Image (cartoon, grey):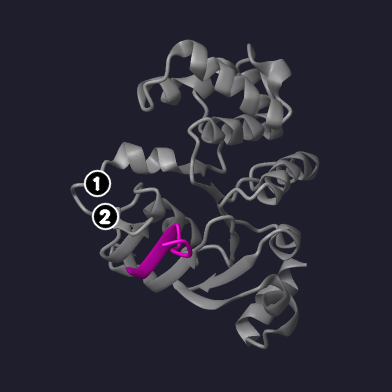
Amino acid sequence: MENQPIIEVKHLAKSFDGTAVLNDVSLQVKKGQCLAIIGPSGGGKSTLLRCLNKLESPDSGEILFKGENILSHTVNTNHIRSKLGMVFQSFNLFLNMNVIENCTLAQIKVLHRSKEEACQIAKKNLEAVGMLNKIEARPSELSGGQQQRIAIARALCMDPEAILFDEPTSALDPEMTVEVLQVMKDLASKGLTMVVVTHEMSFAKNVASEVIFMDKGVVAEQGTPEYIFEQCQNPRLKSFLGFSK
C-alpha cells in the first residue's frame, strides 16, 4: 500500500516499578515525514523512542514497521535496528575505535558488506555531515557536536528507512547545537523519515511536518507545527511552550 505508514504505534503501554510511563499511546509516521515529539521531562518521550528501537519492551500494544509487528518473537531485532536507525543524546560511539571504524563496524557485522564497500559508504555519509576530514580521529579528540554528526553518519550508513533521534542536542552547547540541527534540517529537506524527541522548539516549529506533545505518558496534542504552536488552546501545552521560550 502506497500510503501505508512506515511506523504505526497502537495502544502502547509501559510501566516501570508500577508507575505508568506510556499510557495508550498511538501514532503514525509516514514516509518522508519529520515527526517532532515535544513535552516535559518524564513525559514518556524517550521511553517511546526506545520501544520503537526495541531497547525497551512495552507491556502491551503493537508497533508496526511497514505493517509487521516488530514486537513479535519471530522478528529479527538486528534487522529492525538497521532499518530504524537511532541517534542518542550521549552519542554512543565506540571510544576505542576511530571515526571510520565506528561507521563501518555495523555495516560489516550486520549487513555483511565488504570492508571496502563499507568504507566507501562511510566516507560518503561522513562527507554529507561535514566530517570526512576526521576519519582517523578518535571520539575523545572531537567536540560533542562533531561526535553527534558522526553518530548521524553512522546511522545513515545502514541505509535506514527512518532514523530516531533521542534529544540529539541536549548534551551540546548552543554553538554545537546549531551545527547538528543544520545537519538534521538538511536530512529532513532530502525526505529522510525522522522521529525526533527534542527540546529545540525552533526545530519542531520550522522543520517538522508533524508535532506531538506528550505529557504524563499520553499523546496530549498532535498536529501541524502551525496548529501546535499557534492555534492549539490546550492550557497544559500553552504553559509548556511559555516556559520553553
Left or right position of 68 against 209: left
Q: Which mark is residue 75?
A: 1
Q: Is residue 10 magenta?
A: yes
Can you name the residue that lies furthest to the left here? 73
Q: Which three-letter amino acid code belongs to the residue tagged 2?
A: Leu
**134 vs 163: above or below:** above
Q: Which three-letter amino acid code belongs to the residue tagged 1?
A: Val
Q: Give the image location of residue 137, x and y in percent.
A: 64, 14
Label 2 to label 1, Cα distance in Å?
7 Å
State the SS at label 1.
Answer: loop
Residue 97 visible in the shown view: no
**Magenta stretch?**
1-12
Q: Give the image location of residue 74, x and y in percent.
A: 19, 47
**Which label lies toward us, 2 or 1?**
1
Q: Which residue is under mark 2? A: 71
Q: Give the image location of residue 7, x and y in percent.
A: 43, 59
Q: Kindly identify the residue that appears in the image at 52 percent across and 73 percent down.
A: 215
Q: Kindly identify the residue that appears in the image at 76 percent across and 39 percent down.
A: 179
**95 vs 23: above or below:** above
206 or 137: which is nearer to us? 206
State the SS at label 2.
Answer: loop
Q: Kindly identify the residue that appears in the image at 69 percent across and 79 percent down.
A: 227
